[in-house]
Amino acid sequence: MSMLYAILKEASYIDTVHILSLHGMVPEVAASLVPLCEVFGSLEPALTNKSSQGDEPTVYMVFSLAFLFLLRLWKFYRPPLEQGITEHARAFRGELTLEYLLLLRNSRTASFQYETNGNPDEIECISDKAIYIDFYPKLRSWYCQNKSCVASTLSGLSSESPPVHEVSNKILNMIYSKMTKTGSSSSGSPASTGEDVCQRPMLPAWEVLEAIPFVLEAILTAYAHGRLSSRNLTIGLRELVDFLPASLATIISYFSAEVTRGIWKSVPMNGIDWPSPTAILPSVESEIKEILGAVGVNIPSYSYEVSQIMLPLPMAALVSLTITFKLDKSLEYIHAVAGPALENCASSCPWPSIPVIGCLWAQKVRRWHDYIVVSCSRAVFRHNKEAVAQLLRSCFNAFLGSQLVATPSLSNQSSMNGLLGFTLSACSERPFVAPGFLYLRSCRTIQIVQYVNDVIVGLVAEYARDSSVRWPSHVSSRLKSSQASLCLAAAMAKKVATLGASLLCIAGGFQLVQELYMDTIPTWLLSSNEAQAKHGEVSALSCVVEGYAMAYLLILSGSVMWGIQAKLPMCLFTRRARILGIHMDFLAGVLEGKISLGCHPATWKAYVSCLVGLMVKFSPAWIQEVKLETLRTLASGLRGWHECELALSLLERGGAAAMGSAAELVNVIARV
């Protein structure tokens, strides 16, 4: 137990978890924590005068370290893009499930597992075996109860056995004893006396966690009916965490669900009943507006009195609990769970709840002021679609704005500096962030992520058109007749599309790319006349560059998500073939006259020609996944546009089945 305590304590530090994530080891570490939680959560702790938050290992402390570590990996872990290309890609966005992490670990283990071939000298290691949550009944029981509590109120769990309520009463008695003790304090980490420990129930941790939702409902109800003060409520919650630190996980889960349900009244953050943020709230709001204004995002101003600053009761209780924890290295495993959970929970509250919560923490830790203000400024993008659109436009402006009036350079360093910035506070004494940096820190939390697709496609089209309009007239004239100058236009289109594809993939991954192929681009082709009408008459050159840019956007996005190679896992291969086939069938339907477009003919021709050209040159494996009849239709359409060489290249890469069609095309070209 001493060794496990030391290992888990060191592994729980925030930097360690980041390193594990960078090395892609999160699923393996999570799987190794599961049996530790099952075993130590089933043991009864020995009667001791040591606190669970002390430096000595106890059953409760080892369990809490393992359990909270597992919670962080499962709740707050976000896989990088390259790990999204797996058979479990469905979990790319949103909160991961514990089952997902275990399945991902099992799939990796299976791919590297060796064959014993009946050799008795080779011993199968336990780490080579598949791990499923059903193998661990105590963990599975809590996991199912936790999901039930999140999905519905505790009234839906009325069939719970009597021992759960008996344990709840014991915990409530312990909490009440702490509340009524003279000189109780809710700050710091109070040392547990022998008398305190004797009053604590010595029960397995799983039994305590199972009873905690009922304890929380009881104390919130007591406060709501005036039988418990806010100070004693916070003391009770802190005593619960001091008793079993792992209880913080259930507290967070329960309070987050209750905030979402909205069944508790809001309470005034006036400094009397609950802590007040008014000392620094005006300045923090001003800094948030300044940060957002610097990247072109405008949010409404709020003016209210102290009595109007309200938070939902569970949110007020949670933030009041978190600010009681000391900023000590030994409690980093607590802060690493409480911090992200507090931010996620606050996002369910109406604005400006997040600035209020940020102010309470900024008052506690002044050196975290800049970090907290920047975090608060990110929160506006969770629900505000208009703010997301403004931020995306700022990203395009920062990356492309200075290059739209001159010859574009794909290696222009200033464009990257404008997008991502140099440092957090390079431009002023106040915190400042570049638009790209703010987007990267916010895009994974956007609630209506499908909206990002429409905005990015619109911006790519707009900036592609503008790039040709803003070039000098002599360059524009050469573009109409010079192949070299046309390459210059294609280079600018590629630059616009590269930014768009990057912003799109990092925000929504597979989900947005699939929607791009199946819905967004076809809709754009069908309705482009409306967009062009808003911008007035556009030249044929602008239409060509716009078509090029959209083709690059489609190919680059698909390449990032699916890859361009022929050998892929079967599930990913099937998905790519299906989505690509649907889009190519749409193009073939237009060429056959079955579908009428709204875009400019030059845009349509440039889009198809560029798309096919890119597939032929960079992703020939994709072409073999397209139906032969569709390839024949595309080749026929290209030949009608006098793109005979491109049409032939398309059929040549269609595999053996397309060889006959390629030979027929050669004969037709020869006769002509």
Image (cartoon, helix red, strand yellow):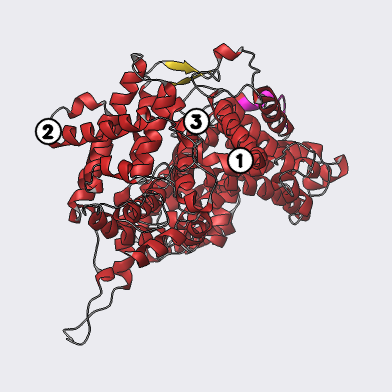
Compared to 369, does 653 lie above or below? below
Mark 3 or mark 2: name the one nearer the start of the chain: 2
Which mark, by number, is residue 162? 2
Q: Name the amino acid type tagged 3.
A: Ser
Which quadrant of the rendered structure holds the N terminus?
A: bottom left
Query: Residue at the location (48% across, 57% down)?
Result: 17
Mark 1 or mark 3: name the one nearer the start of the chain: 1
Badge nearest the viewer, 1 or 2: 2
Q: Give the alpha-carbon distance from disc 3 to disc 2, as whole Å.
A: 68 Å
Q: Name the amino acid type tagged 1.
A: Tyr
647 or 15, which lies in front?
A: 15
Q: Name the amino acid type tagged 2.
A: Pro
Let me know if residue 366 is in the magenta part: no
Badge nearest the viewer, 3 or 2: 2
Let me know if residue 534 is in the magenta part: yes
Question: Residue tagged by mark 1?
Answer: 439
Are the residues tagged 1 and 3 within 8 Å (C-beta)? no
Q: Secondary structure at mark 1?
A: helix
Highlighted magenta segment, given as a residue range: 531-538
Are the residues tagged 1 and 2 within 8 Å (C-beta)? no
Badge nearest the viewer, 1 or 3: 1
Q: Give the alpha-carbon distance from disc 1 to disc 2, as whole Å.
A: 50 Å
Query: Residue at the location (31% across, 53% down)?
Result: 63
Residue 546 at least partly seen: no
Question: Residue tagged by mark 3?
Answer: 596
604 or 399, which lies in front?
A: 399
364 or 489, which lies in front?
A: 364
